[in-house]
Amino acid sequence: MHVLQQPVLVLSRSYLPVDRVTVKEAVCLIARGKAEAVEMGDGKTWLVRSIRKVYEVPAQICLTAAGVERIWKVPPVNRKELFARDANLCQYCGSKRSLTIDHVLPRSRGGQHIWENVVTACEPCNTRKGDRTPEEVGMVLKAKLKPPVHPAVAFAEQLWKS
Ligand SMILES: [Zn+2]
């Protein structure tokens, strides 16, 4: 792999990983004063020569600007993020068609419109379930009923997995 294509981890000012760029993009960020080198761990660096300057690019850079992690709140329940959480699949039968929002504990029985009580369900499953809980109908729920996480946390989880 060419040196300019090597991966560089981008950290926010509070050292949360927020992105991964190439050495070439990292040089641009450093040259424009948007990021600076971070010395950590193995101290691996790449030397990149431009016409006038030699840039030493380490495996991690840190953004100089604040505001990358603005105060982030769990968003209210919405179709887009719910379907994304549940991978656009009915969480009872795995169907991709006629997706709706199902309240695990039905609203008619006091179920709330919150992340911990909603799942993606296809229309047939939603109709079959009706005003009952999955247990009462003998349906198995696949989803983990969690709110969405901060984008930086989601990025970090992906990163540590790869
Ligand atoms: Zn279904």
Image (cartoon, helix red, strand yellow):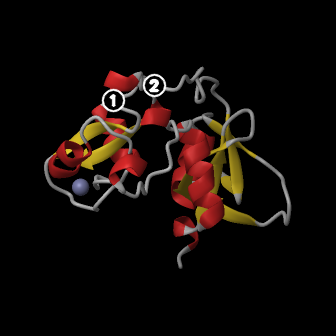
Q: Does the residue labelled 2 lie within 8 Å of ligand 1?
A: no
Task: Judge whether 69 appears above or below 92 on screen.
Answer: above
Query: Along the horizontal axis of the image, is 21 left or right of 110?
Result: right
Q: What residue is drawn where x is 41% and y is 34%?
A: 105
User: In which quadrant of the rendered image does the C terminus lie?
Assistant: bottom right
Near mark 1 (Cα within 10 A), the count class, few <14, some 14-19 or many ≥20, is few
1 and 2 marks in contact (CB < 8 Å): yes
Check disc 1 and report the residue beneath it.
78
Comparing 145 with 47, the one in front is: 145
Q: In which quarter of the image is ligand 1?
A: bottom left
Quick one: 94 or 68, which is closer to the camera?
94
Q: Give me the residue at 60% from left, 28% from top.
A: 69
Q: Name the element at disc 2.
A: loop
For mark 2, what is the residue? Answer: 75
95 lies left or right of 40: left
15 shown above or below 64: below
